[in-house]
Amino acid sequence: MAQAHKVHLRIVTADAEIFNEESRPHHRSGGAGELGIQARHIPIVTTLKPGELRVEQQQTEKVFAVTGGFLEVRNEDEGSAAIVPGQRG
C-alpha cells in the first residue's frame, strides 16, 4: 500500500521492467509543461519531453534518461502509481 507522501513509480521498456519502487513525489517535463506527481494525484496520461527523470529515495537519487513517450498516473490503493513506458534499448 502506498504511503500518503510517496508515489509508486514503474519504469518499463519493451524488454524489461527497470524500476518498480516507492519514491518521493517528483517533477517531470510534460508536453504541456512542468508536471509534479504527488500521492493521490488525479489520473492522467501525458506526453513526456526528452530529458532526465530523477527519482529520490531516502538518501539516494537515481537518474534515468527519458527519450520521450508518455506518463500514466492512476490511483492505486491509497496513493498513486506513475508508469513510464520506455522504448526498446
Image (cartoon, grey):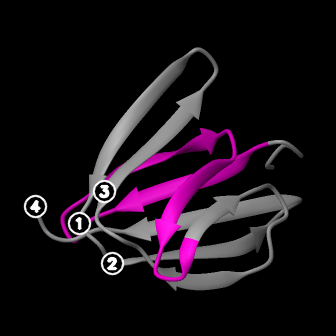
**Residue drawn at (23%, 66%), measured in percent from left and top?**
67
Confirm or deny contact between disc 2 and disc 1 (CB under 8 A). Answer: yes
Q: Which residue is mark 4?
A: 89
Span highlighted in magenta in the image: 6-33
3D distance between C-alphas at marks 3 and 2: 11 Å
**Residue drawn at (80%, 55%), measured in percent from left and top?**
39
Q: Earlier in the sequence, mark 3 or mark 1?
A: 3
Q: Which residue is mark 3?
A: 51
Quadrant of the rendered structure where residue 16 is?
Answer: bottom left
3D distance between C-alphas at marks 3 and 1: 6 Å
Q: Earlier in the sequence, mark 2 or mark 4?
A: 2
Residue 52 as seen in the image, left or right of residue 60 = left
Which residue type carries mark 3? Gly
Q: Which residue is mark 2?
A: 69
Confirm or deny contact between disc 4 and disc 1 (CB under 8 A). Answer: no
3D distance between C-alphas at marks 4 and 1: 11 Å
- Answer few, some or many: residues within 10 Å of disc 1's Cα (few below 14, many 20 plus, some between 14 and 19): few
Which residue type carries mark 4? Gly
- Whether 23 is drawn above or below 89: the answer is above
